Image (cartoon, helix red, strand yellow):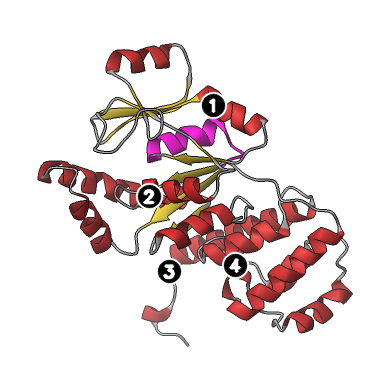
C-alpha cells in the first residue's frame, strides 16, 4: 500500500484529471484545424519547434500524421520509419535532424497538393526592455513585405526617433480626438503615464492588400486586439532570465531610477500574463527571435 504522504489528495486528483481533459481537448482542436484546412501542418510544426510549452509541442507525431487528409492509418508506420521517428515521439521532442526531415516531407506534400500557407497578423508583446522594438526593427529591415504597425503616442520622442517612422507623436488633445473619432484599433495608458494607440486604417489597408502585419504592442493593447482581431496570432517575447531583463533596462539608460522601478513592477504583471498568448519566443539573440516571429508568419528571408 502507498503511505499516506504518497497518496494524491482527492482535490489534487480532480484538478489533475481536469487539466488532462483540457489538454486532450486542446490537442484535438489543433488536429481538427489541420484536418479541416484551417491551419497548415507546417504551421503546427513551426509552433511546436519554437514553443516547447505549446499544445502543438505535446502532440504525438503519429497522431499529428493522422490529422493529415489522405494519410491513412496504414501509411503512418512507413512514414515514421522513413523519417526515423518513434511512434511515441511528440512534435516538441523531435531532434534537429528529425525536425528537418519532417519539415521537408511536409513541404513536399504541401507542394504536391498545391497547399499554401496564409501569412498571419502577429501581435508581439512582452515585458518592458525585453527587446520588442529591436526585434520589430530587425524584421522591418530584413523582411520588407511585413507591414509594421506604427503607434501613436503622447510621450516625447527619444533621441533618434522620427515622427511617422517610429511613432506618431501627438499631444493629449490630439490623442483624445483620435479616441473620440474611433480611428484607433486599440489604445492604452502604459506605466501609468503616456498613452499609446494603433491607427486603424493603415492596418486594414495592409491586410486588404494581402500583406502580413506585425503589431509591436503592450499587454493592454494586445488584449484589445484579441477582441477586435481574433484571427491574429499573439506572440509573447520573453527574456532569457529576470536578471537579464533588469540588466537590459539599466543599460538602456533612457529612464530615471524611479521610472525603472515602475517599469520593473509592470514587467512582473506582464510576465504573469504570458499564458494568455498563443506562442512564447525567448529573445536570446535578436536575429534568432526575429526569425522565429517571421517563421510564424509563414515567410522566408529573401
Residue 182 falls within the magenta-colored stretch: no
Residue name at image x 23 percent, y 44 percent = 263
Q: Which residue is mark 3?
A: 9
Identify the mark nearer the N-term, 3 or 1: 3
Label 4, label 1: how many angstroms apart (C-alpha)?
A: 37 Å
Q: Give the CA distance from mark 4 to mark 2.
A: 31 Å
Q: Residue 225 vs residue 173: left or right? A: right
- Of pointers 1 and 2, the one earlier in the residue sequence: 2
Q: For the magenta stretch, what is the residue range?
A: 218-232
**Mark 4 or mark 3: which is in front?**
4
Instruction: State the residue in front, 74 or 232.
Output: 232
Separation of disc 2 and disc 3 at Cα? 47 Å
- Which one is in front, 86 or 114? 114
Q: CA distance from mark 1 to mark 2?
A: 22 Å
Seen in the image, is 151 located left or right of residue 97?
A: left
Mark in the foreground, 4 or 1: 1
Task: Look at the picture and state if 150 lies above or below 276.
Answer: above
In the rendered structure, which disc, 2 or 3, sits on the residue that comes first in sequence? 3
Residue labelled with disc 1: 202
Where is residue 207, by image quadrant?
Answer: top right
Residue of label 4: 58
Q: Residues within 10 Å of mark 4 (few under 14, many from 20)?
A: some
Would you say 199 lies left or right of 267 here?
right
Badge 3: how crowded within 10 Å, few (<14), some, or many (20+)?
few
Q: Residues within 10 Å of mark 1 (few under 14, many from 20)?
A: some
Amino acid at each position: 500500500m502507498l503511505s499516506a504522504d504518497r497518496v494524491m489528495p482527492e482535490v489534487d486528483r480532480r484538478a489533475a484529471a481536469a487539466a488532462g481533459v483540457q489538454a486532450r481537448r486542446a490537442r484535438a482542436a489543433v488536429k481538427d484545424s489541420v484536418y479541416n484546412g484551417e491551419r497548415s501542418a507546417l504551421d503546427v510544426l513551426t509552433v511546436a519547434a519554437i514553443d516547447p510549452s505549446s499544445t502543438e509541442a505535446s502532440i504525438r507525431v503519429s497522431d499529428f500524421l493522422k490529422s493529415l487528409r489522405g494519410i491513412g492509418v496504414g501509411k503512418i508506420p512507413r512514414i515514421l520509419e522513413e523519417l526515423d521517428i518513434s511512434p511515441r515521439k511528440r512534435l516538441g521532442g523531435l531532434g534537429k535532424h528529425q525536425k528537418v526531415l519532417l519539415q521537408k516531407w511536409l513541404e513536399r506534400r504541401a507542394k504536391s497538393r498545391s497547399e499554401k500557407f496564409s501569412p498571419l497578423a502577429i501581435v508581439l508583446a512582452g515585458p518592458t526592455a525585453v527587446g520588442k522594438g529591436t526585434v520589430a526593427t530587425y524584421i522591418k529591415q530584413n523582411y520588407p513585405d511585413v507591414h509594421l504597425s506604427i503607434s501613436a503616442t503622447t510621450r516625447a520622442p527619444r533621441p533618434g526617433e522620427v515622427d511617422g517612422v517610429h511613432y506618431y507623436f501627438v499631444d493629449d488633445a490630439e490623442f483624445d480626438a483620435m479616441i473620440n473619432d474611433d480611428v484607433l484599433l486599440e489604445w492604452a495608458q502604459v506605466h501609468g503615464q503616456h498613452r499609446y494607440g494603433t491607427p486603424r486604417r493603415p492596418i486594414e489597408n495592409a491586410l486588404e492588400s494581402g500583406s502580413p502585419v506585425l503589431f509591436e504592442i503592450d499587454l493592454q493593447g494586445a488584449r484589445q486586439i484579441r477582441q477586435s482581431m481574433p484571427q491574429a496570432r499573439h506572440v509573447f517575447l520573453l527574456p532569457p532570465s529576470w536578471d537579464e531583463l533588469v540588466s537590459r533596462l539599466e543599460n538602456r539608460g533612457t529612464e530615471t531610477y524611479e521610472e525603472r522601478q515602475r517599469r520593473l513592477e509592470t514587467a512582473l504583471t506582464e510576465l504573469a500574463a504570458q499564458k494568455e498568448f498563443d506562442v512564447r519566443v525567448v529573445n536570446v539573440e535578436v536575429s534568432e527571435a526575429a526569425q522565429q516571429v517571421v517563421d510564424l508568419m509563414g515567410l522566408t528571408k529573401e
